[in-house]
Image (cartoon, rainbow, N blue to C red):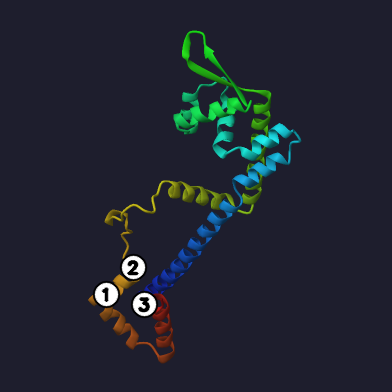
Amino acid sequence: MTQFSETQSTMTESVEREILFQEMMQQVAAMQKQFLSEGEDDERRWMMERTSDPNLIAFLKDSTVIMLHVIDAIGKLEPVNGITISKQFGIPRGSVSKITRKLAEQGMLNSELLPDNKKEVLFHLTPLGRHIYILHKQLHLHIERNVQKFLLRYTVEQMRFLVQCMKDTSATSWVQPESEQDEPQTASPVQVLEEPTAISEIVTMLHQLDERNLKKVKDIIQIAFLNT
């Protein structure tokens, strides 16, 4: 009966794995919806609620995420040139040039040429730009505190698993072509049942069961392999 118990356990695990998979897909969709609903507009609103300066409010109403990221980069590294901003923060150089020009026009930053290199431009935040930088920093600290509070519900071991899961997810493409090397090497329950020797052994074991236990086996097979 040991082999039958192992087959039953494999069937049960297969059913639970499928249920968990479906639930995970639903949660991924729910997370995407949440991120879209609580995104750029909510962050701008949070910062606008914490200032009474009309110039800052006017800027925040029209700002984009990438503009705030450039301000954040300059605030952390100033004086800094566009190449460094691009490399350190992963923003295309062309985008950095366009955004810094726009931010200069809006009074968020100043630029200066180096005396010995007229082609290199260094950026500094103006007092107005620094106020935006501080507000944006406070926003991220607020989000970080909320994330830390949320994660208190998990144990250290569970957090290790979450971190590893995130790392694996970020390193995986869900649209690349499938390859045999990526497939798990263990055989599925369906493959086990398709083997002639396994079928014979299972039939032999079924003959040893009474009607009540045969019904249990029937229900397990129905749930694990025949329901769609």
Q: Which residue is mark 2?
A: 188
Toward the top, the furthest residue is 116
Q: Which mark is residue 194?
A: 1
What is the three-letter code of the residue carrying label 2? Ser
Instruction: Tell me where residue 111 appears, x and y as whole percent.
Output: 56, 19
Toward the front, the furthest residue is 105
How far apart in space, not on screen, are marks 2 and 3 (Cα)? 15 Å
Label 2 close to label 3 by CB (< 8 Å) = no
Rendered residue at 56%/52% (across/down): 36
Disc on the earlier residue, 2 or 3 = 3
Q: Nearer the viewer, mark 1 or mark 3?
A: 1
How far apart in space, not on screen, are marks 2 and 1 (Cα)? 10 Å
Q: Who is closer to the viewer here, 140 or 132? A: 132
Q: Is residue 177 visible?
A: yes
What is the three-letter code of the residue carrying label 1? Glu
Q: Who is closer to the viewer here, 180 or 213? A: 180
Element type where label 1 sits in the image? helix
Q: Is residue 148 visible?
A: no
What is the three-letter code of the residue carrying label 3? Phe
Rendered residue at 29%/70% (across/down): 191
**From the viewer's perspective, is 28 left or right of 2?**
right
Element type where label 2 sits in the image? loop
Q: Which residue is mark 3?
A: 4
Circle 2: is it few (<14), some (14-19), or many (20+) Cα within 10 Å? Answer: few
Instruction: Tell me where residue 143 appears, x and y as whole percent.
Output: 64, 43
Instruction: Tell me where residue 19 appears, x and y as whole percent.
Output: 47, 68
